[in-house]
Amino acid sequence: MSNIAPLIDDFALLKAQMADLEEKIKPLRDQIEALGEGAYEGTFYRVTVSKSERANLDSKAVRKKLSRQFIQANTTYTPVTTVRVTGRTAVDVKTEG
């Protein structure tokens, strides 16, 4: 066992705890959302409910209408790092070094 095992296990444990908390948060959020727009205060915290509209662009439809050159000229790229947690399988495992 490598010395990265505790790091991986701690990370995965915290992610699992977050998932458990998300399950507990959802019904509370739903109840707060049902109160309607406005600010609500508890003993220690304040929650604000607001509603807005989000615009989403249908990129497939845009690609059909615009040239490949136009899309390439107006596309920006942002580096993204994703770290996922799953159960152990011992398949394709990278080790330190």
Image (cartoon, helix red, strand yellow):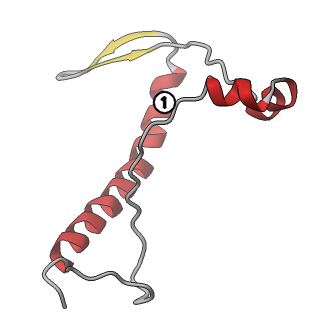
* Pick the front one: 48 or 32: 48
- Vertical placement of residue 87 versus 52, above or below: below
Question: Which amino acid type corresponds to the residue marked 1 in the rendered image?
Answer: Gln
SS for tag 1?
helix
Give the quarter of the figure containing the C terminus: bottom left
User: Which residue lies at the image location 41% right of the left edge and 42% below the top edge?
Assistant: 79
Q: How many marks?
A: 1
Q: Whole-percent x and y of residue 3? A: 13, 81
Q: Which residue is farthest front?
A: 69
Q: Quadrant of residue 1?
A: bottom left
Which class describes the residues within 10 Å of circle 1: few (<14), some (14-19), or many (20+)? few
Q: Which residue is farthest left?
A: 3
Q: Quadrant of residue 60?
A: top right
Q: Whole-percent x and y of residue 44? A: 17, 23
Q: Whole-percent x and y of residue 27? A: 48, 40
Give the residue number, with chain letter if any, for mark 1. 31
- Give left or right: position of 32 versus 14: right
- Vertical placement of residue 71 versus 40, above or below: below
Q: Whole-percent x and y of residue 7? A: 18, 70
Q: Quadrant of residue 49?
A: top left
- Vertical placement of residue 61 versus 24, above or below: above
User: Which residue lies at the image location 65% right of the left edge and 18% below the top edge?
Assistant: 55
User: Which residue lies at the image location 49% right of the left edge and 18% below the top edge?
Assistant: 35
